[in-house]
Structures are given as C-alpha cells and as structure tokens.
C-alpha cells in the first residue's frame, strides 16, 4: 500500500509528539532490529525509529531497507529520526481519503 501526500501530511502531524520506539545502534540493521520494528509496527501502526552512527546516505539506505523488509510506508525523516506507517489488521489510525 502506498500512501498519498495528503495522508503523509496527516501522519506527520500524528507522529510529531511520538518518541522513538526502536533504535538502530552501531551494529546496524540486524534481523533482530527488523523483527522488532515489524512487531512494533503491528502494534502501533505509526512509529519513530532512531538511526545512530550513520551518515546521511547510510541512514537513507537503512530507511529504504526497513521499508522494503517490513512493507511500511516512509512518513518523514529529520536528522537521525524517521517515522514509518503500516496499517494494522484493525486500523486505529483513520487516514483521510484521496
């Protein structure tokens, strides 16, 4: 599922007050970190992830890898923080229509 720009703006507003729930450390993106992101997305739908110890290009590569492996949608990236969204089976977040 791909979200529209209007939906992305709505999710950015919702993500503003969130704290990072998952931290990608110096070891990088391991299978354990991916499974933690996957389970956290299943529970919360919209999460923030902190990516430590990487330059801008490496951070973007990590975000792209997370999106590909979890099926989530990228919402925003600011510095070392990114927000991701994936609807749950019973969605708690109602997205605006196109």
Image (spheres, helix red, strand yellow):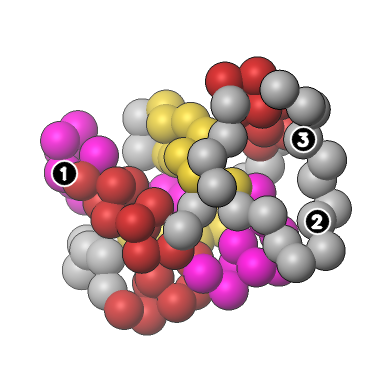
Label 1: element kind: helix
Can residue 13 be seen here?
Answer: no
Q: Give x and y (percent) for residue 59.
A: 24, 42
Crowding at dot 3, Cα within 10 Å, few <14 / some 14-19 / many 20+, comes out as some
Q: Give x and y (percent) for residue 68.
A: 34, 56
Q: Does residue 43 appear to the left or right of 91 in the view shown?
A: left
Q: Give x and y (percent) for residue 96.
A: 79, 27
Does 35 appear above or below 28?
A: below
Q: Nearer the viewer, residue 13 or 85?
A: 85
Residue at the spot x=80%, y=45% of the render? 93
Does 35 appear above or below 18?
A: below
Quarter occupied by the C terminus: top right
Residue at the spot x=44%, y=63% of the render? 70
The residue labelled by disc 3 is: 95
Q: Does residue 54 appear to the left or right of 98 in the view shown?
A: left
Label 3: element kind: loop
Q: CA distance from mark 1 to mark 3?
A: 30 Å
Q: Nearer the viewer, residue 57 or 9?
A: 9
Magenta span contains residue 14:
no
Does 95 appear above or below 89?
A: above
Crowding at dot 2, Cα within 10 Å, few <14 / some 14-19 / many 20+, comes out as few
The residue labelled by disc 2 is: 91
* Dot placed on the residue nearer the N-terminal end, 1 or 3: 1
Q: CA distance from mark 3 to mark 2?
A: 10 Å
Q: Does residue 38 appear to the left or right of 18 in the view shown?
A: left
The residue labelled by disc 1 is: 58
Image-quadrant location for residue 65: bottom left
Residue at the spot x=42%, y=31% of the render? 77
Q: Which residues are magenta?
A: 38-60
């Amino acid at each position: 599922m791909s979200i529209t720009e209007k939906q992305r703006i709505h999710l950015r507003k919702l993500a503003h007050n969130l704290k990072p729930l998952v931290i990608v450390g110096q070891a990088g993106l391991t299978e354990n970190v991916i499974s933690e992101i996957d389970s956290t997305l299943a529970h919360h739908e919209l999460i923030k992830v902190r990516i430590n110890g990487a330059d801008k290009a490496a951070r973007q590569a990590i975000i792209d890898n997370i999106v590909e492996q979890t099926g989530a949608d990228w919402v925003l990236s600011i510095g070392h923080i990114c927000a991701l969204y994936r609807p749950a089976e019973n969605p708690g977040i109602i997205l605006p229509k196109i």
